[in-house]
Amino acid sequence: AYLADFASTNAKKLSQDSSISNLFSAFFEHLSILSDGADEDEGLEFAVQSILTALLELLGAIQDGSPPAAKLDKEKSFNKWAELIITIIGGEGKNSPTRILQSIRSKRTALTLLTKLCSSYPSSIAEKLITAMIAMISNTRSKREACSSAESLNLIVPTYFKCSQAAGL
């Protein structure tokens, strides 16, 4: 969590480094490891939230600074990363048990990350936004989560329409 916080705080500087793609891959690998298993440990939820925030800040710094394609050159990884995000918000995914995000804040951060990835790489991510919408709606358990799901749809739907044209959907 400390490394993720450092990355969030220093995202602008880190985004200028030529190995930013490796840092992204490492954070997604840690996210995958922390998401393995079905137990509900609040400490793990905090660590996952920290990683999601770091990824979001790094991607934002990349998008603000230079063309993302020049920095994140592993487009085939985006598919895998999008599937991981969808799995941890409650979508169908890996066969092994997965720790699904519990907090509304974590889910919103994950969806924001997914939509930012889609804005940069619509051909890889756009069709996955429908799956993300279904995951959010199907995992709504309370009135508070229903309001959050509606807010999430307000984030995903415009991104989908914008990116689906670019992706040829």
Image (cartoon, rainbow, N blue to C red):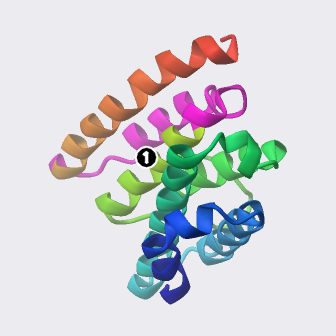
The residue located at (54%, 58%) in the rendering is 88
- Please tell me whether the stretch drawn in magenta is mainly helix, strand or loop: helix
Residue at screen point 62% across, 47% down: 92
Residue 95 in the magenta stretch? The answer is no
Please tell me how crowded label 1 is: few (under 14), some (14-19), or many (20+) other residues with Cα within 10 Å: some
Return the residue nearer the eye: 142 or 103.
103
Residue 84, position in %: x, y? 65, 55
Asked if 165 appears above or below 150 in the picture, the reply is: above
Residue 97 is at least partly visible in this image: yes
**Picture quadrant of residue 119:** top right
**In the figure, is residue 114 to the left or right of 20?**
left
Q: Is residue 123 magenta?
A: yes
Name the amino acid type tagged 1: Thr
Location of residue 109 in the rendering, given as x and y in whole percent from the top left corner: 40, 56
Local SS, label 1: helix
Residue 104 sits above or below residue 99 on the image: above
The residue depicted at 55 percent of the width and 85 percent of the height is 3
Of residues 7 and 110, which is closer to you in this image?
Answer: 7
Residue 66: x percent and y percent? 62, 44
Q: Position of residue 12 (x, y in %)?
A: 51, 63
- Residue at the spot of label 1: 112
> In front here: 43 or 137?
43
Numbered range of the magenta stretch: 118-143
Who's the residue at 39% across and 83% down the image?
42
Q: Is residue 40 in view from this perspective?
A: no
- The number of callouts visible is 1
- In the depicted structure, whether residue 168 falls above or below residue 133: above
